[in-house]
């Protein structure tokens, strides 16, 4: 008997404040997320938070429906509970990976079930969250998985005279090489991938550092200042109280 089918304790997400943003791919298409969670309240919370963050969200309350949706629809990310009725999350994940589905999957586990985490990762999960969790942590992990999945989609980005190649980790300005530190490069690459959109300081911190980083540090401001000395300063706009934005050609038109 599969031990993931036995009843699990009720678990909910902790309330939190999370960023509202339009989640789109490089072509401007809204990113799609599937939530598979049998706890109706938690399912509803997850759908609401992800929808508020800009994603197009579908949901399922049991394993069979979740497996069918994940197998037939092109999702960009799946949030999958392990202890589901009709078909457990580990079996679902194994079937998806067996059929070569590469969509990022974040599994949800009971807090004290370390064995769930191990089996989930072994089955092909990309990340996991133990219940109860803060919704803003789920959103941060979702963004991280989507960034990783899209990392190789477009290797070269241009913005005015600045050209950035993610494959070779090279930046040029008007054809001349620009020397950047690894953190400067990652910060510029993230802003250029999201050019035209205001990126909050919190989002930049999450992209550059792990969860233990001191969010009150002024490191982001220091990196922005350095970048403005190495590329035309006007390309990176400060949006007071909100964050930073790369000025795209469309914005200037």
Image (cartoon, rainbow, N blue to C red):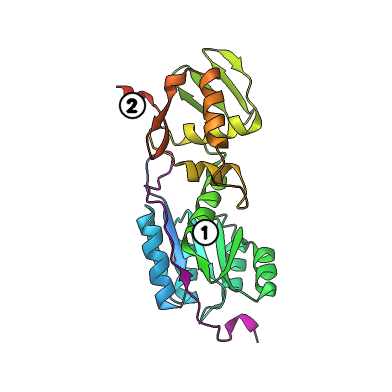
Judging by the rendered image, the residue that carries numbered circle 2 is: 250
Quarter of the rendering occupied by the N terminus? bottom right
Picture disc at residue 241: none
Judging by the rendered image, the residue that carries numbered circle 1 is: 137
Q: Is residue 18 magenta?
A: yes
Please give the name of the residue rendered at 44% of the width and 58% of the height, measured from the top-left corner: 33
* Main secondary structure of the magenta stretch: loop
Magenta-tinted stretch: 1-27
Q: Position of residue 137 (x, y in %)?
A: 52, 59
Q: Position of residue 161 (x, y in %)?
A: 47, 16
Please give the name of the residue rendered at 33% of the width and 27% of the height, measured from the top-left corner: 251
User: Element type at marker 1?
Assistant: helix
Q: Nearer the viewer, residue 133 or 78?
A: 133
Quarter of the rendering occupied by the C terminus? top left
Vertical order, 4 against 96 (above or below): below
The image quadrant that residue 218 belongs to is top right
User: Element type at marker 2?
Assistant: helix
């Amino acid at each position: 008997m599969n031990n993931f089918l036995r009843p699990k304790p009720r678990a909910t997400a902790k309330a939190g404040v999370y960023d509202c943003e339009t989640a789109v791919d490089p072509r401007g298409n809204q990113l799609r997320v599937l939530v598979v969670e049998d706890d109706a309240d938690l399912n509803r919370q997850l759908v609401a938070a992800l929808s508020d963050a800009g994603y197009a969200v579908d949901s399922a309350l049991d394993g069979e429906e979740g497996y069918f949706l994940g197998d037939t629809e092109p999702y960009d990310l799946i949030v999958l509970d392990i202890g589901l009725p009709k078909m457990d999350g580990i079996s679902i994940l194994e079937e998806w990976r067996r059929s070569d589905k590469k969509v990022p999957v974040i599994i949800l586990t009971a807090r004290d079930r370390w064995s769930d985490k191990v089996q989930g990762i072994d089955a092909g999960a990309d990340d996991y969250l133990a219940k109860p969790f803060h919704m803003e942590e789920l959103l941060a992990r979702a963004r991280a998985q989507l960034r990783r999945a899209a990392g190789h989609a477009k290797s070269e980005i241009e913005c005015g005279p600045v050209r950035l190649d993610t494959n070779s980790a090279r930046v040029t300005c008007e054809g001349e090489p620009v020397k950047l530190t690894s953190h400067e490069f990652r910060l510029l690459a993230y802003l250029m991938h999201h050019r035209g959109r205001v990126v909050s300081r919190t989002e930049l911190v999450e992209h550059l550092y792990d969860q233990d980083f001191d969010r009150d540090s002024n490191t982001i401001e220091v990196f922005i200042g350095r970048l403005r000395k190495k590329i035309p300063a006007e390309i990176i706009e400060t949006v007071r109280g909100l964050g930073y934005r790369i000025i795209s050609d469309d914005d200037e038109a």
